[in-house]
Image: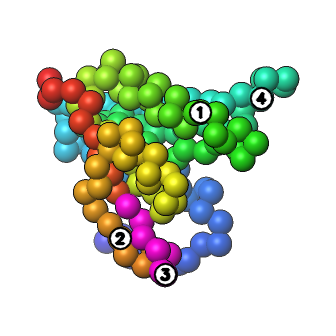
Amino acid sequence: MKQAPKIALVDDASALHPIVLEGVRGFNRTLFAHHPPGKDLAIAIRDSDSGEPVGGLCGRTNGGWLAIELIFVPEVFRGMGLATQLIAMAEEEAQRQDCHSAWIDTLNPKALRLYQRLGYEIFGELKDYPIGGSRFFLQKKLGPIV
C-alpha cells in the first residue's frame, strides 16, 4: 500500500505551476477525448527598435472558446488602440480555430469599459475583489456553434 503524500505550502509556485497545469490538461483530455485539444495563443507587442516583446496578450482556445487570460499594454503605448487590436487579432485567430465565443475577466474599470465597447457582456461579478472593488467576468459571441 502506497503511503499518503505530504501536503505543504510553497513560497515559489514557478516549479509547481507547470506540473499542476499539465495534470489538469491531461485529465481534461480524457474527459473530452473527442474534442480538439486546446491551444495556447500569444500575440506580442514588440519594441520598434529592439524587436523585443514589451507587452501583449496571452490566452488559450479550448472547447470552442477563446479565454483571454492576460493582456498588458505598457503605459507609454496606452491610448494607441493596441488593446483593441490585440483583442481583435485574438478573436480572429479563435474563429479560425472554430471558436464560437470568448471570455475575459478584469478588475480594472477602464478595461471593463473597453471590453464592453468591444461587445463583451458581464456574466459574473466577484464583489470585494479587491476589497472595495469587483472582478468582472465577460463573454462575447464570436459566431455560430459548429
Q: Secondary structure at mark 3?
A: loop
Q: Closer to the N terminus: mark 1 or mark 4?
A: 4
According to the image, label 3 marks what residue?
Answer: 131
Alpha carbons under labels 1 and 2: distance apart: 27 Å
* Corner quadrant of residue 5: bottom left
Q: Is residue 92 above or below residue 53?
A: above
Image-based side of 130 in relation to 125, left or right: right
Q: Amino acid at mark 3?
A: Ile
According to the image, label 2 marks what residue?
Answer: 126
Alpha carbons under labels 1 and 4: distance apart: 13 Å
Q: Is residue 133 magenta?
A: yes
Q: Closer to the N terminus: mark 4 or mark 3?
A: 4
Q: Closer to the N terminus: mark 3 or mark 2?
A: 2
* Corner quadrant of residue 102: top left
According to the image, label 1 marks what residue?
Answer: 82
Q: Badge 4: how crowded within 10 Å, few (<14), some, or many (20+)?
A: few
Whether label 1 touches label 2, CB < 8 Å: no
Q: Closer to the N terminus: mark 3 or mark 1?
A: 1
Q: Amino acid at mark 1?
A: Leu
Alpha carbons under labels 3 and 2: distance apart: 10 Å
According to the image, label 4 marks what residue?
Answer: 47
Q: Secondary structure at mark 1?
A: helix
Q: Badge 3: how crowded within 10 Å, few (<14), some, or many (20+)?
A: few
